[in-house]
């Protein structure tokens, strides 16, 4: 029984380490959008002078 708990604990710690590393390292390699995309995104904003319902 203790052998199963040790193995489960090791697998859980490895999984937790992978989750933490992915969440910490992935933003470091995220590319910034180029200016052309930013300008096209600004055109899709829906702005109104009156309030909605």
Image (cartoon, helix red, strand yellow):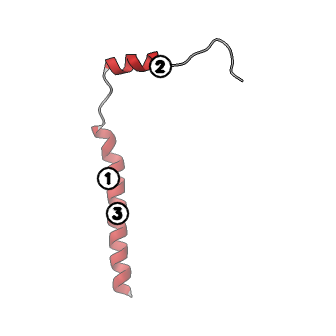
Residue 1: x, y in percent? 39, 88
Q: Earlier in the sequence, mark 1 or mark 3?
A: 3
Q: Quadrant of residue 49?
A: top right
Badge number at residue 21: 1
Q: Is the residue marked by circle 1 packed among few (<14), some (14-19), or many (20+) residues within 10 Å?
A: few
Residue 39: x, y in percent? 38, 16
- Please identify, in this view, whether the residue under mark 1 or under mark 2 is nearer the observer: 2
Which residue, as the protein is rendered here, is positioned at the far right? Answer: 53
**Tag 1 secondary structure:** helix
Residue 5: x, y in percent? 38, 80
Please name whichever residue, 18 or 48, is drawn nearer the observer in this view of the structure.
48
Q: Is the residue marked by circle 2 packed among few (<14), some (14-19), or many (20+) residues within 10 Å?
A: few
Q: Quadrant of residue 47?
A: top right
- The residue that appears at 31% across and 44% down in the rendered structure is 26
Residue identified by numbered label 3: 15
Badge number at residue 9: none
**Tag 3 secondary structure:** helix
Please name whichever residue, 17 or 34, is drawn nearer the observer in this view of the structure.
34
**Tag 2 secondary structure:** loop
- The residue that appears at 30% across and 46% down in the rendered structure is 25
| Alpha carbon separation for disc pair 1 and 2 | 35 Å
Residue identified by numbered label 2: 44
């Amino acid at each position: 029984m203790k052998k199963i708990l040790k193995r489960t604990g090791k697998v859980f710690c490895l999984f937790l380490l992978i989750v933490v590393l992915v969440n910490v390292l992935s933003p470091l390699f995220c590319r910034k959008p180029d200016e052309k995309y930013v300008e096209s995104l600004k055109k899709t904003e829906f702005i109104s002078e009156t309030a909605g319902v």
